[in-house]
Amino acid sequence: MNASGPKQRVRRDPRLLIGSALLAALCAGAVLGPLLTPGDPLAIGDVMATRLLPPFSRSTTGAWHLLGTDAFGRDVLGRLLVAARLSLSVGVLGSVLAAGLGVVIGAVAAWRGGWVDRLLLALGDTLLAVPRLVLLLVIAALWGPGLGTVVSVLALTGWMGVARLVRADVLGVRALPYVEAARALGASSSRTLWRHVLPNALSSAAVAAALGVGSAITLESGLSFLGLGIQPPAPSWGNMIASGRDWLLIAPWIALAPGVALIVTVVSATLLGDALSERAASPGRAVPSSP
């Protein structure tokens, strides 16, 4: 049997291709936003002449607005692409920090065992018992809204699931013969963990981090929608949806555009995470080399 078969199937997985292509297109749009839209998307000009223009229309200045304008006459596409920078950055950074915290906590809990393991598991179970949105709202309300608050809150409330996955992987890897060989050769306990055990127990954490990007972006948008996330005039998809809810009947494109962008991003991250999950579970994975 050809050992490269599973890897070839993963490379041809349409979920991986579609998810990667959509995320790449969103990132490219976020970077090239100023070149793709007319004027400054954050500036307020002649409001009466440019407000609430429908999609595919031109203003009196001749500027073409692909997704129309909002109640202040600002180009919706331009604001959408600027908001993508914040929303994508917050989602990726929050998910990566949460995964990193979960990796450290899960690895330490599994490696040390005893009361350390029980204490960290009890802490994680306690936080998991509380709905994450409630934790987000409480912490954001106590710390005050802002970019740093949102990223910190996402990291502090998203590590529990990753910690359990890493703990299970470390418990499995530490029983393999090459770990005993590393110890027999004189490797310290910490070196054995971080150099030999943990690198071979990170596949689940990587998948969880990819899947967590969509969840983090959704939670950030929810906080911004409620006024506890990114604050205007800085645009995010959440506060754009919030600003467009009063105009749903006469100008639905204001809230619809960021809503569709949010859905596409979450679906893309989910497709990518599913493909990576199948790759991590596929047979023929590399066997760890001996120390």
Image (cartoon, rainbow, N blue to C red):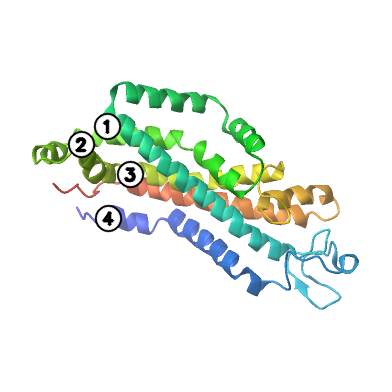
Neighbours of disc 2 within 10 Å: few (<14), some (14-19), many (20+): few
Residue at mark 4 to residue at mark 1: CA–CA distance = 35 Å
Task: Name the element at disc 2.
Answer: helix
Which residue is situated farthest in the left direction here?
185
Q: Which mark is residue 202?
A: 3
> Which residue is labeled 2 in the image?
189
First in sequence, mark 3 or 1: give its number.
Answer: 1
Residue at mark 3 to residue at mark 1: CA–CA distance = 15 Å
First in sequence, mark 4 or 3: give its number.
Answer: 4
- Observer-nearest of 197 and 21: 197
Q: Taking 280 as reference, is 79 above or below it? A: below
Which residue is situated farthest in the right direction here?
48
Which residue is situated farthest in the bottom direction here?
62
First in sequence, mark 3 or 2: give its number.
Answer: 2
Residue at screen point 36% across, 58% down:
11
Residue at mark 2 to residue at mark 4: CA–CA distance = 37 Å
First in sequence, mark 2 or 1: give its number.
Answer: 1
Task: Name the element at disc 1.
Answer: helix
Residue at mark 4 to residue at mark 3: CA–CA distance = 23 Å
Q: Is residue 59 left or right of residue 2?
A: right
> Which residue is labeled 4 in the image?
5
Contact, mark 2 vs mark 1 (Cβ under 8 Å): yes
Q: Could you tell me the amino acid type at mark 2? A: Ser
Residue at mark 3 to residue at mark 2: CA–CA distance = 18 Å
First in sequence, mark 4 or 1: give its number.
Answer: 4
Q: Could you tell me the amino acid type at mark 3? A: Leu
> Which residue is labeled 1 in the image?
111
Q: Could you tell me the amino acid type at mark 4? A: Gly
